Image: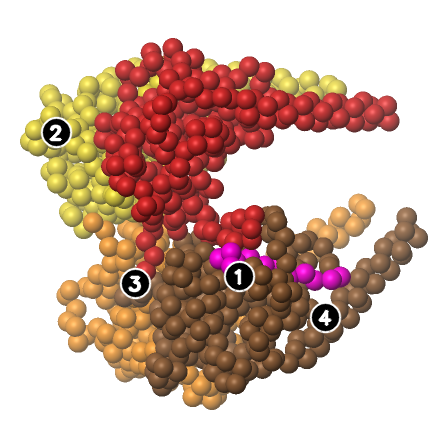
Chain colours: A yellow, B orange, C brown, D red
């Protein structure tokens, strides 16, 4: 029989080498902001995979790796421990395909975090505003009032009524579900159009997160990628403008 | 593991201070009539929250409070006990997102009610007629024939074939599920267009409910809000009319 | 807690007065053919309700009776025992809203039938052909090859490839699920447009079923209703034709 | 009560006559490529049915056989054992209707395979490219890197980024779920338009599979069927072209 949610820890890693006081969630979502931030940190810090989660609540498909081998869709836990501190990361291919699955998976993540000694979680997401933004704000939400000043001092803002519909998926649920266990929760949402993968928004969130974590992470690769994206976007918009002008000639 | 439905009572409130013979349900629905009535009563009577219900059958998201802190979507139970009698209220952000969840949550509400000594429940809803109505009727349904006269004397009407499709969601299911436990059930549905939040319809339902409960509740705030809504609606309709006239000039 | 499917027998009826060798299923479906046939038989024979089935797999709503009282959506079992023999009937408001629910409810019906001594089930449905039909055929399907001759002699036909997509819902599943228990199953499908409730198709099916059951049931009411329907339909079609002619004038 | 997934082995077949080292999956999917290959092999080899799987995750309907008898939708296991070796086949009417069902059914298939001594599975599918293809490639995916050379030598290709969205359904999940049990998994996907049942693509996959299995299977019937299909398609395309030319006259 298959379990609804399966967690497989890398048994070669000793239980004491799985713990950390802080967990950062960066699953796919709006603008892939959370995914970009978490994966950038994993790469820069050289974090190590310690566990895989598979579930019947993920889409029923496998991913093909570059070498042609397949693996089940999953979410993965990485861990970094070094001079910058100790962090856990949750990243992955997908979030749940059903509402019930969202709750059950988020609860499992919080239970794992609790077991691994986590005292604070950061969930990273995008806040889609439906138009291109020049200056990207980082909107915050917290699960304990006392976290507010710290978050504001790091450069994030609390904006009443934003996002209007609440926070959907793991980024929101993990905050809500961690409160009863006494785990502090901070959600950082990078403003983004919502139309494209947005490394610029991710870079802005990273700036805030670096301050909160007191960690030194190079953001060159992320800003370079943001720059390339910006150029590509600029070209796209100009092309569109040109097409419109030509059309107005014809008209 | 997460339970499918979780009930958390405020432990600081003694079990004997949780009971009441009457429960009023006002969850979101057509015209938010039930929600408006129940929340108005909670506010006017100064009812106190005694329990929260969270569930995987609610949408997978958190709500952001004004101070930037989040909480899980939930349904809440309030209680008032004083010179007007003792009442329980069920209100909340959402109803279930699935058919099965509707049944399971409604059964939990009835089980809680039964445990807390409830002998009668009122479920409040809107009856959407698809056009703006001048004089709002309050349509009733009951789960025991003997309740009919009492309900009619309070000003509600029974109208064969209305609503045609039965009563959907908690307002209906709680009536159906309470019958086997011997709990009396009365559903009051305020006629409403179904297009807008409708405080006028809510005020009309409140008039009927006040008589049934023999309770003295000021409806000033609700009627004021209805008045403002009416003015806004009037302006909207006039504007629309003007636009049409201008269009007919052009035509 | 609520059970996913609940069966409540009328306790005032002794267990030995619940049995019968034959069960007839007439739940809602295409043209409501099954529902019309089963409800007509229940009425004509004066069958008595012996059980109610409620379930979280039915739509989450209550039905309002003429007197304003509500009841949960349900499926009901009726029983007739007299000079014509002994029959059970399954009728109701709805079928399941989910695929899984269809299977689970159909299995429960077969388990009940088995327990009540049923040796043969008839499931009645409509076969929607997408156009109005002059002469209504009764298409049959069976769960044991040996039933074929008997069914053909009663006036039903086996038509290879009809219905093309198999038989959906309880009418099909009950046949399939009863085979392992050794219960004979016959499905009779009245040809119908699929656009309207079709008492004419129901009357034709009844003619076949009467022969199979060797039971004498007056079909006056059903044929009268079919006649009225025919007149209404004729008028509708003429009106449509007239409108088209008028339009061709204008054109 | 009904089990969510039921496996019924033919009890007349001794347990030792159910085993095989290789399993081939050919359930319905894009272009019905897998279904065509597996059913062709079953027919040519004269494989024997040894088990049936029914499930609430299949569509809620029955299939009507040519003789008018019905059977539940199912998946079936066939077995061949002879001079060509020993093979198991999984074929059937449908795949699951839900994501969760896909996972649960695929896991059951892998568990059965494991129990029956299977060391390698082949899953066969179509790779829909959205246009008609002259020369059909066979795209491969594997669950162990060491299988690559063998698969390439048999004529299949690994093409990075194809299929882009991973492999959906049983063909993919069975590969992913068999890896932890040490079962080798190879997925062969015949390129196909995705618009039509494609025996030509199936014949190409068969050529590759024959080499991998070192088995001698006549493909005459499959190629004949592919030829007929080709002729029908050619006629269709010519007709369409003619209609367009006629239209351009009018235009």
Instruction: Tell me, yes or no, whether dots 4 and 1 are on the same chain.
Output: yes
Residue designated by label 4: C229
Query: CA gap, disc 3 to disc 2?
Result: 44 Å
Q: Which residue corresponds to the image point at 36% horizontal and 75% vertical from the top-left? A: C8
For the residues labelled 4 and 1, the Cα–Cα distance comes to 34 Å
What whole-number distance in Å separates the C-alpha atoms at marks 2 and 1?
61 Å
Left or right: where does residue B179 sit relative to residue A16? right
Mark 4 and mark 2 in contact (Cβ < 8 Å)?
no
Magenta-colored span: C134-147
For the residues tagged 3 and 2, is the chain the same?
no
**Separation (CA) of disc 3 from disc 4:** 51 Å
Image x and y of residue C104, in percent: 39, 58
Choose between C160 and A27: the one closer to the eye: C160
Report the chain holding disc 1.
C
Q: Does residue C146 belong to the magenta stretch?
A: yes
Q: Is residue C198 above or below residue B188?
A: above
Can marks 3 and 4 be said to lie on one chain? no
CA gap, disc 1 and disc 3: 58 Å
Residue under circle 3? B76
Which residue is identified by label 1?
C147
Residue B76 image point, x, y percent: 30, 63
| Nearer the camera: disc 1 or disc 3 | 1
Tell me the crowding category of disc 2: few under 14, some 14 to 19, or many 20 or more residues within 10 angstroms, Cα based. Answer: few
Classed neighbour count for the residue bearing mark 3: other residues with Cα under 10 Å, few (<14), some (14–19), many (≥20): many
Cα separation, mark 2 vs mark 4, equals 73 Å
Q: Secondary structure at mark 4?
A: helix
Looking at the rendered image, the quarter that the N terminus of chain A falls into is top left
> How many labels sit on residues?
4
Mark number displayed over residue B227: none
């Amino acid at each position: 029989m298959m379990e609804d949610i399966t967690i497989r820890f890398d048994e070669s890693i000793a239980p004491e080498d799985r713990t950390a006081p802080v967990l950062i969630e960066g699953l796919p979502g709006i603008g892939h902001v959370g995914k970009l931030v978490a994966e950038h940190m994993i790469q820069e810090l050289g974090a190590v995979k310690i566990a895989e989660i598979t579930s019947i609540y993920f889409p029923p498909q496998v991913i093909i790796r570059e070498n042609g081998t397949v693996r089940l869709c999953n979410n993965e836990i990485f861990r970094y421990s070094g001079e910058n501190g100790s962090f856990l990361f949750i990243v992955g291919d997908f979030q749940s395909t059903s509402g019930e699955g969202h709750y059950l998976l988020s609860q499992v993540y919080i239970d794992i975090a609790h077991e691994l000694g986590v005292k604070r979680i950061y969930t990273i997401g995008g806040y889609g505003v439906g138009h291109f933004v020049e200056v990207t704000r980082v909107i915050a939400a917290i699960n304990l009032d006392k976290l507010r000043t710290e978050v504001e001092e790091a450069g994030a803002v609390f904006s009443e009524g934003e996002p209007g519909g609440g926070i959907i998926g793991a980024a929101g649920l993990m905050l809500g579900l961690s409160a009863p266990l006494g785990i502090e929760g901070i959600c950082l949402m990078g403003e983004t159009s919502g139309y494209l993968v947005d490394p610029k928004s991710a870079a802005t969130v990273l700036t805030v997160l670096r301050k909160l974590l007191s960690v030194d992470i190079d953001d060159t690769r992320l800003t370079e990628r943001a720059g390339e994206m910006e150029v590509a976007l600029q070209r796209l918009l100009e092309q569109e403008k040109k097409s419109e002008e030509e059309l107005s000639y014809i008209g």
